[in-house]
Amino acid sequence: MNLSLLLSIRFRSKIRGVEQMDFQESTHLYLDANEAIYVRNYMMNNTANTGNKLTKRLVESTKVDDTKEILVWDSELRGFAVRIYPSGRRTYFVQYRNQFNRSRRKKIGVHGVFTTEQAREEAKKILGDVAKGSDPSKQDREDKAKPTMRKLAEEYLAVYAKPNKKPKTYTTDKNIVATIFLPRWGERKIEDITPHDVQTLHRDLKATPYYANRVRALISHMFTIAIKWEWIEYSPVRGVEKYQEHKRNRWLDDTELQRLWQVLADFPQQDMANAVRLLILTGSRYSEVMNATWDQFDLEKGVWTKPAQTTKQKRMVHLPLATQAIDVLRTMQKDTQRLKDAQTKTEQLKAITHPDYLFPGNNPTKPFSGMRRYWYTMRQQAGFPDVRIHDLRHTHASHLVCSGMSLAIVGKLLGHSRSVTTERYAHLSDTPLREAAAVFGDKLATLTMGIKPKPIEAVVVER
């Protein structure tokens, strides 16, 4: 029998479990005679059975063996020992049997960080927990297996965010994770994150309240997903309130629209001018217009069918088109056809295999992505450098409301899934309220015609 091979492969774990047992106890591990003899010899050669109480002097005076580890057991507290490594490092531990009669070890700490007496007291606590049915070693393994915030972030991005969110949103989430979450909480267990931790993070971002709220929303959703995965039982984001956000109400009035339309007429890049015209005439989101393909439009019926994957509410939308929008699209269609006619046969074949975007990029597999720099020039020329592209959508909605359209209809055109989103334009549709208020005012004026208030007489107050 090759006993060294036996040790290294088959019985190393068993030997560790019997280092404090006598020869008779080893037979319960189902060893044959030769194996039991080897186990006994192994214990004798690797254990310093001093028969003394572990003290600082004994621990430090025990000589180091450069070829193997040495175990020094305490004579008073059964299971308490120190392991001396060839490197000279000394570590306290306690050995016990769990409820299944299996030998286990629990590390206490390194000599120097723990004194011998401190380690002894800790050993007593551990053995006391074992007597109550606990298994500290198992608990340690379970704690190590609990997911960290780094694990949650990686799984959230890979399993949920990437398949379900838009590429831009996924990139934003990834940046927040890399710059905010991981530096603060990366190695912490998910269950250790408290509401105070979340509140502190939110407070530290107070200088940028909108961004702070976006970070809070991402944290909240990550913990919601963790609850669904049964990694935790509650979310620490509960009770952490958002900072108040003031929605922008910037939109173009009649004069500004006239100036912009003149700028668009004179703009050298008419394809980019057409993009702005469609944004205003349809009230659609920037991503919806720039990612639109010709097969989404039925110009005869005047309908734009937006696929579910391109809309914010993740459902198909059929948007009726104004005559002016159809005219813009027909003009673009003619320009596109002229460009196709000018293409070589090779270019035409290459274009067939890719989406036919309204605004194609240099790479035929993707739409044009540089429109924002052209908008910067347009707004400077029109004299309103503070207007964002998304404000064109507000302009569309605001003018509809001012023209008497109901909020319900405007919300339908904008593709709002919640009526509360459209209510931001309610202050623009107060004409019916003014008329209703005037009805009673006029009636009261008629009823009280000729009745004038009595002049106020001066009253002298005696002092």
Image (cartoon, grey):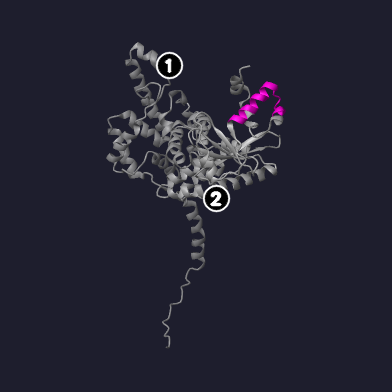
Q: Is residue 296 left or right of residue 372?
A: right
Q: Position of residue 110 (x, y in %)?
A: 52, 41
Which numbered mark, 2 or 1, is in the foreground of this view?
A: 2
Q: Pinpoint residue 140: horizontal percent, then vertical percent.
A: 59, 38
* Quadrant in the picture for residue 360: top left
- State the residue at coordinates (29%, 37%): 377
Q: Is 175 in the magenta? A: no
Note whether residue 134 is visible: yes
Give the camera-side residue of 198 and 24.
24
Element carrying mark 2: loop
Residue pointed to by mark 2: 239
User: Residue 279 appears in which quarter of the rendering?
Assistant: top left
Magenta range: 26-45
Secondary element at tag 1? loop
Whichever of callouts 2 and 1 sits on the residue coming sooner in the sequence is: 2
Q: Would you call the spot at circle 2 few (<14 residues within 10 Å), some (14-19), or many (20 or more)?
A: few
Q: Disc 1 marks which residue?
A: 353
Taking 446 as reference, is 369 above or below it? above
Location of the N terminus (image quadrant): top right
Locate the C terminus by quadrant.
Answer: bottom left
Tell me the kind of residue under disc 1.
Thr
